[in-house]
C-alpha cells in the first residue's frame, strides 16, 4: 500500500485540511452554481411580483367592465337622443311641413315661409327659416309653445310683433321671425387640392 502523507499529520492537521477542502468545495458550489441559482430565483420572484401586480390591475379592470359597458350604452343612447334633436339634412322637408302644420293648428295665417342660406358650423349646419304670420297674440303664443314641444331643436329669434292697422277678431297682430333649426353632419373628409400631382 502506498503511504498517505496526510496520514502522517496529526489529527488536528488532518481535520484542518479536510475543513479547507470542504470550504473549497462549498465555495466552488456557491460560486459556480448556487449564486446563479439565487440570482435566477430573485429575478423570477421579481417577475412574479410584477405579473401579480398586472393580474390585480387586470382583475380590477375586468370587475369594472360591466360598469364601462353600461356607460357606453348610456352614452350611445344619449348620442341617439342628440341625433334626434339634430337630424340629418334629409329630414328638413318634414320639419318645414310640421312647422307649417303647427302654424295652421294654432290658427295663424302663414304669409311667408322661406328657408335662408344655411350657415356651416363644425359638425352641424344652422338653417334659418324666415316666417311671416298673422293671427292673434294668444295664437302666436300657442304656436311658440307647440314648437318648444317638438323633439327637434328649433330656436325662434328676431321676433317682431306689430298690431294690425285694421284688426279683426282672428287677426290682431302680424309677426315676423326667424326660426333656426340645426342639421347634424358627420365630419367632412378633407377636400383634395385641385390640379395636384399626377
Image (tube, rainbow, N blue to C red):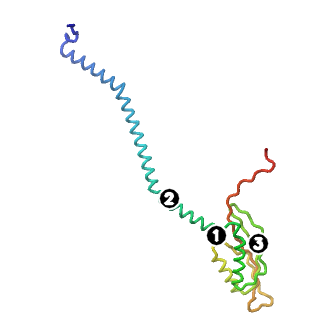
Q: Which residue is mark 2?
A: 68
* Residue 56 horizontal side relative to residue 110, left or right: left
Label 3: which secondary element:
strand
Q: Position of residue 61 (x, y in %)?
A: 46, 53
User: Which residue extends farthest bottom?
Assistant: 169
Q: Position of residue 51 (x, y in %)?
A: 43, 44
* Residue 56 horizontal side relative to residue 190, left or right: left
User: Which residue extends farthest top?
Assistant: 2
| Mark 2, other Cα within 10 Å: few <14 / some 14–19 / many ≥20 | few
Mark seen at residue 85: 1
Q: Which quadrant of the view contains residue 81?
A: bottom right
Mark seen at residue 115: 3
Spatial CA distance of label 3 from label 2 is: 43 Å
In the rendered image, which quarter contains the N terminus?
A: top left
Label 1: which secondary element:
helix
Q: Are discs 3 and 2 less than 8 Å apart at CB?
A: no
Spatial CA distance of label 1 from label 3 is: 19 Å
Badge 3 or badge 2: first in the primary sequence: 2
Whether 143 is drawn above or below 76: the answer is: below
Badge 1 or badge 3: first in the primary sequence: 1
Q: Position of residue 188 (x, y in %)?
A: 70, 57
Q: Position of residue 88 (x, y in %)?
A: 68, 66
Amino acid at each position: 500500500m502506498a503511504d498517505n502523507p496526510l496520514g502522517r499529520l496529526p489529527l488536528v492537521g488532518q481535520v484542518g485540511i479536510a475543513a479547507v477542502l470542504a470550504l473549497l468545495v462549498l465555495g466552488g458550489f456557491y460560486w459556480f452554481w448556487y449564486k446563479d441559482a439565487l440570482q435566477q430565483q430573485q429575478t423570477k420572484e421579481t417577475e412574479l411580483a410584477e405579473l401579480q401586480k398586472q393580474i390585480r390591475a387586470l382583475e380590477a379592470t375586468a370587475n369594472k367592465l360591466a360598469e364601462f359597458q353600461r356607460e357606453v350604452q348610456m352614452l350611445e343612447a344619449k348620442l341617439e337622443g342628440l341625433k334626434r334633436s339634430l337630424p340629418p339634412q334629409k329630414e328638413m322637408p318634414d320639419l318645414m311641413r310640421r312647422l307649417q302644420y303647427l302654424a295652421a293648428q294654432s290658427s295663424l295665417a302663414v304669409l311667408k315661409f322661406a328657408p335662408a342660406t344655411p350657415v356651416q358650423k363644425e359638425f352641424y349646419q344652422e338653417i334659418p327659416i324666415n316666417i311671416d304670420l298673422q293671427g292673434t297674440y294668444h295664437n302666436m303664443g300657442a304656436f311658440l309653445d307647440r314648437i318648444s314641444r317638438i323633439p327637434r331643436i328649433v330656436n325662434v329669434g328676431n321676433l317682431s310683433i306689430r298690431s294690425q292697422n285694421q284688426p279683426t277678431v282672428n287677426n290682431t297682430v302680424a309677426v315676423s321671425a326667424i326660426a333656426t333649426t340645426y342639421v347634424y353632419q358627420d365630419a367632412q373628409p378633407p377636400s383634395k387640392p385641385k390640379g395636384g400631382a399626377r
